[in-house]
Amino acid sequence: MKIAIIGYGKMGHAIERIALERGHEIVAIIDAENTADFDSEAFASAEAAIEFTTPMTAPGNVMRAVGKGVPVVCGSTGWGDSRALVDKAVTEAGGALLASSNFSIGVHVFNTISRRLAHIMDKLAQYKPHMSETHHVHKLDHPSGTALTIAEGIIGECGRVDGWADEGVIWMNAEPAERETQEREAEARAKEIPADKLPILTYREGEVPGIHTVTWESGVDTITISHSAKSRDGFALGAVMAAEWIAGRKGIFTIEEMMKSLLD
């Protein structure tokens, strides 16, 4: 199939490589320097576009793409405030959008396990939940979109967890004294978080692709589940699979709908 790539950073390069390996044709690559190419015949010929840019540019990119009749797979996070506006534009254009905080198949499996564990823990009040997420230092939003998706799953399955709370950010590459200050501040915030909130602690370190950990702790033991990405390839593969899936469709879709149709 013909694929357009919007955003040509590290994820864009990984998507290009994996799409070519799967036999697809890249008909357009749009980055900050050539946004006029949204109006090109090459872009309009795409059967799907894969968008990985920034929270600031993603909404406009999606709307421009669907305005050209191209379905969009969007992996950018941190633009939730614009989601209703974007969905309205997609619907009015008769287009298609699948936006997800994470396209990793492994993360989808992890989230399914996490929701099931939260359902069990709803009946075991002695266990208190906590979450942490680690990403590379270039990631702008925090907590990560994936962490928030996992948190929403926990909140939906465990009635005694009523929302999440930001425990703060620790920059692992900071000077030791500065990092110690960040750790103390996070610890102080943690003590102020109500018992019915899920605390989420954020780490930013080097080029880490992504680590998400959910912990349920009691006075006598700890239960921990974790997903650690080895590279960006898992996200890129899932995004290309999503492009293959959304081609020819119209509407607003979720990664859960895609996975259900692929696995059932």
Image (cartoon, helix red, strand yellow):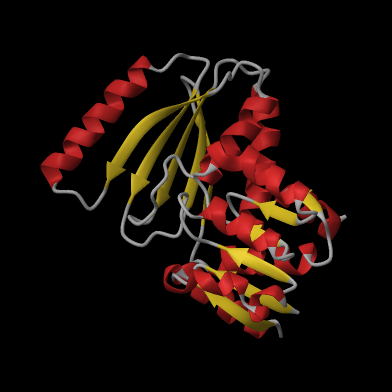
Q: Position of residue 53 (x, y in %)?
A: 49, 60
In which quarter of the view is residue 194 placed? top left
Give the quarter of the figure containing the N terminus.
Answer: bottom right
Quarter holding residue 193: top left
- Quarter of the picture containing the C terminus is bottom right
Labels in figure, total: 0
Q: Residue at x 63, y 47 (%)?
A: 110
Q: Look at the picture and state if 5 lies above or below 71.
A: below
**Residue 253 visible in the picture:** no
Choose between 132 and 100: the one closer to the eye.
100
Among all residues in the image, which is located at the extreme left?
A: 177
Q: Nearer the viewer, residue 180 or 49?
A: 49
**Residue 191 percent location from the top left of the image:** 34, 17
Q: Is residue 187 left or right of residue 208?
A: left
Provide residue 17's location: percent of width, then percent of height: 57, 81
Q: Note whether 153 is above or below 49 in the view shown.
A: above
Seen at 48% across and 55% down, the residue is 57
Q: Residue at x 55, y 76 (%)?
A: 29
Instruction: State whether residue 77 appears in this view.
Output: yes
Q: Quadrant of residue 96?
A: bottom right
Work out whether residue 241 or residue 70 is closer to the camera in this orientation and state it: 70
| 47 left or right of 164 in image | right
Name which residue lies at 65% across and 34% down.
153
